[in-house]
């Protein structure tokens, strides 16, 4: 989470359809790459959940996945690119049959890299939970777990019946393996996003509230919590439009523009590999099919990270990453 130090409100727009790039230009701002040190890898769109906020339209009906050759090419790129962080996502990456071998391959090629795995928690339940968590521990994988709420009714309204109990169970197992525990070096972070068409609450207050509540009720500990706004593309955009809320939500994002957050947006230091092996400036551009720099490049065709100062393709969804404190 990129915490802005100053909320810019005096020039904040209401959304009238103005392109994000045009707005930046009017304000004398620009968005180009810095040194790219993070490689994000989207293993596919298959997921056991169908969340209304999903920007990828992931779910049980999706079959797109990274094949074995592309997995190998991506691991090679992680090595030759010298990336400091490898961020594995989906869909539900836990449901990809090649996940563990990919993690081991990354660790072998990039022994000093930080490997992150983004999990919706419930996808681990049918994957041999303890075996997977043990494998993650062995490879030193940081686990980034999505837990939208600690209230059962609120969480299951967003994710489906039974998801709350399974999520709590899995977090407890992770704690037993040392994740989220002081002194182990095994990182367990939580991600919280709103259930509707509004911006997330204050991150520090939310973290304190979650930490106290889930420790008191379930004995669960974690390292950090990040609050993130929902991106108005994919299934979430369809939901907004169906409720007649799209324009209002976009106005809220644009009206909360924070120039300080622009400095820390993830696309400045990240490149995303899609399940098909092509490169994107971020996972949101991946969802929209907008290739990195506006030019389709396969992971096997590039030697190192994108050059500092190179172009980042933007769209109106970028108002999300610069709203309020922003996020990375």
Image (cartoon, grey):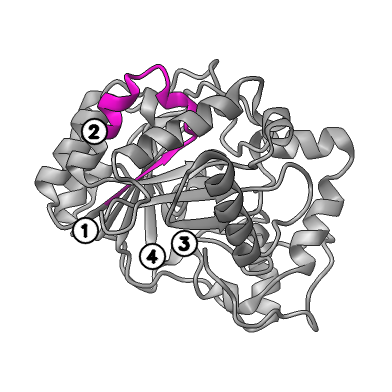
Say if mark 1 contacts mark 2, CB within 8 Å: no
Residue at 78% across, 81% down: 11
Q: CA distance from mark 1 to mark 3?
A: 18 Å
Instruction: Find disc 3 in the rendering and name its residue.
Output: 266
Circle nearer the N terminus (4, 1)? 4
Q: Secondary structure at mark 2?
A: helix
- Closest to the observer, 203 or 20: 203
Instruction: Find disc 2 in the rendering and name its residue.
Output: 134
Residue 29, percent from left and from top: 60, 80
Residue 269: assigned label: 4
Q: CA distance from mark 1 to mark 2?
A: 32 Å
Circle nearer the N terminus (1, 2)? 2
> Within the image, what quadrant is residue 26 found in?
bottom right
Residue 6, percent from left and from top: 65, 83
Q: Secondary structure at mark 1?
A: loop
- The residue range painted magenta reads 115-134
Circle nearer the N terminus (1, 3)? 3
Say if mark 3 contacts mark 4, CB within 8 Å: yes
Q: CA distance from mark 2 to mark 4?
A: 30 Å
Say if mark 4 contacts mark 1, CB within 8 Å: no
């Amino acid at each position: 989470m990129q915490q802005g130090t100053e909320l810019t409100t005096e020039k904040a727009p209401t959304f009238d359809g103005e392109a994000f790039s045009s707005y930046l230009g009017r304000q004398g701002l620009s968005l180009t790459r810095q040194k790219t040190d993070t490689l994000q890898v989207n293993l596919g769109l298959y997921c056991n959940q169908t969340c209304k906020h999903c920007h990828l339209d992931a779910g049980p009906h999706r079959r797109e996945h990274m094949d074995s050759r592309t997995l190998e090419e991506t691991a090679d790129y992680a090595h030759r690119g010298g990336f400091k962080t490898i961020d594995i996502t989906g869909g539900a990456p836990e449901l990809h049959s090649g996940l563990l071998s990919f993690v081991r391959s990354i660790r072998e090629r990039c022994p000093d890299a930080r490997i992150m795995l983004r999990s919706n928690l419930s996808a681990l339940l049918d994957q041999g939970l303890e075996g997977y968590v043990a494998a993650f521990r062995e490879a030193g994988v940081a686990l980034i777990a999505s837990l939208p709420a600690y209230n059962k009714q609120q969480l299951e309204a967003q994710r489906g019946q039974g998801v709350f109990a399974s999520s709590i169970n899995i977090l407890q197992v992770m704690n037993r393996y040392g994740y989220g525990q002081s002194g182990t070096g095994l990182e367990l972070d939580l991600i919280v996003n709103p259930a509707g068409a509004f911006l997330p609450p204050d991150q520090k207050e939310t973290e304190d509230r979650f930490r106290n509540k889930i420790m008191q009720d379930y004995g669960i500990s974690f390292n950090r919590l990040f609050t993130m706004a929902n991106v108005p593309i994919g299934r979430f955009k369809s939901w907004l439009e169906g409720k007649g809320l799209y324009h209002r939500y976009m106005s809220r994002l644009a009206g909360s523009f924070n120039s300080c957050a622009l400095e820390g947006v993830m696309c400045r230091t990240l490149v995303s590999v899609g399940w098909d092996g092509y490169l994107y400036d971020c996972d949101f551009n991946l969802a929209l099919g907008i290739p990195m720099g506006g030019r389709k490049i396969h992971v096997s065709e590039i030697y190192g990270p994108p050059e500092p100062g190179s172009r980042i393709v933007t769209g109106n969804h970028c108002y999300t990453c610069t709203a309020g404190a922003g996020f990375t």
